[in-house]
Image (tube, rainbow, N blue to C red):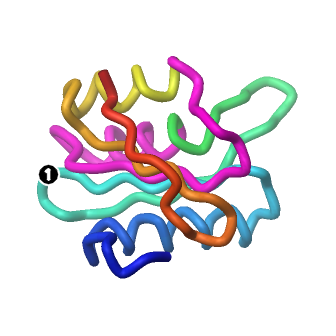
């Protein structure tokens, strides 16, 4: 990761990267709520339930009582995120929440507005 990444943003990228590695899935995500609490998740793939890592992290924040989001991070090999992922962030945090897209090595590749 570059030094230009804010320390709080670096933290959620690291959490997303750790969730991805721990579960051994292609994608990990983390979100930070309005109080600074963080929620990390990996992709959920069950016969009856499929959720991206980002939607899972948003759901965990909602289930824990978060009222809004400050930032989100996704660690993946993909070059973009599905609109449904950005919609989940927007639903809880609004259109201005930055979504940090990082590669498996943790390097920030893009910052996407959840608009």
Above or below for 29 versus 38: above
Image location (x, y in percent) of residue 114: 33, 29
Residue 40 magenta-highlighted: no
Image location (x, y in percent) of residue 36: 19, 64
Image location (x, y in percent) of residue 70: 20, 49
Image location (x, y in percent) of residue 52: 63, 36
Answer with the quarter of the image where residue 5 lies.
bottom left
Q: Nearer the viewer, residue 115 or 55?
A: 115
Query: In the drawing, does residue 23 fall left or right of residue 57?
Result: right
Residue sitting at 57 percent across and 70 percent down?
106
Residue 59 magenta-highlighted: yes
Residue sitting at 24 percent across and 38 percent down?
97
Residue sitting at 20 percent across and 27 percent down?
94
Q: Identify residue for label 1.
A: 34
Above or below for 33 versus 3: above
Query: In the drawing, does residue 5 fall left or right of residue 79?
Result: left
Query: In the drawing, does residue 26 fall left or right of residue 16?
Result: right
């Amino acid at each position: 990761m570059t030094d230009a990444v804010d320390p709080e943003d670096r933290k959620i990228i690291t959490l997303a990267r750790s969730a991805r590695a721990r579960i051994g899935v292609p994608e990990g995500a983390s979100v930070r709520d309005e109080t600074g609490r963080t929620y990390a998740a990996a992709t959920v793939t069950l016969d009856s339930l499929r959720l991206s890592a980002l939607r899972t992290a948003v759901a965990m924040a909602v289930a824990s009582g978060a009222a809004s989001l400050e930032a989100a991070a996704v660690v993946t090999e993909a070059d973009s995120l599905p609109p449904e992922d950005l919609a989940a962030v927007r639903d809880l945090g609004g259109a201005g929440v930055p979504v940090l897209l990082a590669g498996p090595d943790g390097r920030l590749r893009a910052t996407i507005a959840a608009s």
